[in-house]
Amino acid sequence: MYITVKSQSCVCPGVPEGAITCAPCDAGYYSEGYAVNCTACDAGYYSGNAAYLCNECPAGTYNAARGQGVCASCSGETYSRAKSTTCELCVKQ
């Protein structure tokens, strides 16, 4: 995925004038340091639109795939730690 031309009024910082115009990355992707390419967030992380970084999925949620805009909640008797890619079954003692 690339930042694409959408507006002639938004020149990307760090890119020669007239070379490209800015458009935000989609949810699940980020652009670090005004990079031209958008990069997918790793599994266990997420981002909203126009993100400069990815956020950790909080405890109790997970994200199994790259490039996701939200984390899914663990259900029933499962749990997860922050940055999880799966939920684990709670062990009854």
Image (tube, helix red, strand yellow):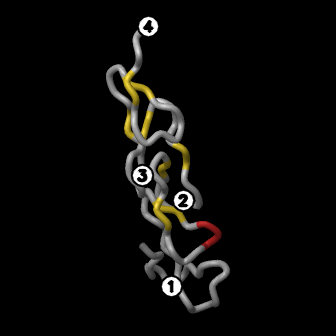
Q: Nearer the viewer, mark 2 or mark 4?
A: 4
**Label 2 Cα crowd, 10 Å radius (few <14 / some 14-19 / many 20+):** some
Name the foreground residue: 73 vs 92. Answer: 92
Query: What is the x, y in percent for residue 13?
Result: 65, 78
Q: Is residue 34 above or below residue 62?
A: below
Query: What is the x, y in percent for residue 15?
Result: 63, 84
Instruction: Locate residue 17 relative to residue 50 in the image: left or right.
Output: right
Q: Which residue lies most toward the bottom here?
A: 18
Q: Nearer the viewer, mark 1 or mark 3?
A: 3
What amino acid does circle 3 point to? Gly
Q: CA distance from mark 4 to mark 1?
A: 62 Å
Asked whether the residues under the numbered discs 4 and 1 touch, taking CB atoms below 8 Å apart as contact, a structural biologist would say no
Q: Residue at x 52, y 41 (%)?
A: 83
Q: Nearer the viewer, mark 3 or mark 4?
A: 4
What amino acid does circle 1 point to? Gln
Q: Which residue lies most toward the top here?
A: 93
Q: Secondary structure at mark 2?
A: loop
Q: Which residue is mark 2?
A: 51
Q: Which residue is mark 4?
A: 93
Query: What is the x, y in percent for residue 58?
Result: 52, 36
What amino acid does circle 2 point to? Ala
Q: CA distance from mark 3 to mark 4?
A: 36 Å
Q: Which residue is mark 3?
A: 69
Q: Secondary structure at mark 1?
A: loop
Q: Which residue is mark 1?
A: 8
